[in-house]
Image (tube, rainbow, N blue to C red):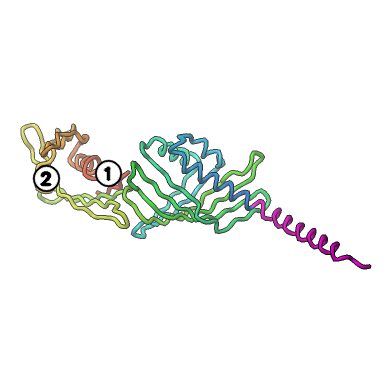
Amino acid sequence: MNISKRSMNKLLFLIVTVFFFQAGIAQKPEAEIERFIRDYAKAYENITKSRDKQSVLKFVSKDLFSTIIKSNVVDNFGLIQSSYADFDAYLEQLIRTEGMQVDYSIKNFLRSKVRGRTGVVVAEVALQVSSKGEIWNRGTEITTFTLKQFKSGWKILNFNVVSLEEEQNKGTCLTELFKASTGNYMVKTIVPKGDTYQSNVNNFEFNPGNGIIYINLDGENNYSWLRDGPITRLASGSQPEKVVGEGIDEYDAILTIIKEDLYKNNCTDFKNKK
């Protein structure tokens, strides 16, 4: 049986077309979940502008659970495990923090796989959190997204994140307090500082006055305090007096000054070691 050259070309074209069509079908589930993750990333990045939690929560299952292993700028590790409720509360915090901005972009998809109604995407993510132009933290996350396909579409069941911090200017601070035999106090506070952490030492001395206690900070009278009442930063130069908080005892007064005045711009929360 003789086949003309023209017929051979048509047959070859048909075979090639079927091959690429089948290849496209085979790749379609992975491409679909990758698009889904890109859409999630865009919604998450935009939440401080949209102020709409549902624009992000619609991508995740109510059974969501996550594990975050965080390596900070000095290679200390931390573990955070959270649920759907925790994620909801975190989004609420982002929305309520004035001037907050999140930059969250997919740099690369490292691996994608679909089997039945289960999907897995491993992505390299660039993350930066800033407020009013000041960078709080910046780094890279390697995130494994585990997805399940429901009748309504794909949902994220799990985030498994390894966070590699490259810059940290605001975050959790550690305070450690020592009391000397003289009754004075020394406080060491470790605060984030770019690509490292900075250790600061402050000395506190309490001097009772006429119904008022004066708090001497590093050799100067900086604060007045009514025991179990307000703590006032004294006027200095062009700076007027300012109430920074309250304290029920000396230890509480020191922590109030550390948290609400000295390192307020460096720390989002504190861990205290007495």
Residue 227 part of the magenta segment: no
Q: Position of residue 262 (x, y in %)?
A: 21, 44
Establish if 106 lies above or below 244. Answer: below
Establish if 35 lies above or below 98. Answer: below
* Residue at the left extreme, as displayed: 210
Check disc 1: other Cα within 10 Å, few if <14, some if 14-19, many if 20+: few
Q: Which residue is mark 2?
A: 205
Q: Amino acid at mark 1?
A: Asn
Name which residue lies at 14% across and 34% down. Answer: 240
For the residue pair 214 and 123, the one nearer the viewer reads as 123
Name which residue lies at 36% across and 45% down. Answer: 130
Q: Earlier in the sequence, mark 1 or mark 2?
A: 2
Q: Position of residue 180 (x, y in %)?
A: 14, 51
Q: Which residue is mark 1?
A: 265
Establish if 15 lies above or below 138. Answer: below
For the residue pair 64 and 91, the one nearer the viewer reads as 91
Which quadrant would residue 194 be assigned to in this image? bottom left
Q: Amino acid at mark 2?
A: Glu
Check disc 2: other Cα within 10 Å, few if <14, some if 14-19, many if 20+: many
Q: Is residue 65 left or right of residue 254?
A: right
Name which residue lies at 52% across and 56% down. Answer: 108
Residue 27 part of the magenta segment: yes
Marks 1 and 2, how far apart in space? 24 Å
Q: Quadrant of the N terminus?
A: bottom right
* Residue at the right extreme, as displayed: 1
The magenta stretch is 1-29
Q: Position of residue 62 (x, y in %)?
A: 55, 39
Tag in front: 1 or 2: 1
Name which residue lies at 29% across and 45% down. Answer: 267
Q: Position of residue 93 (x, y in %)?
A: 40, 38
Q: Is residue 257 left or right of residue 165?
A: left
Asked which secondary structure carries label 1, the reply is loop
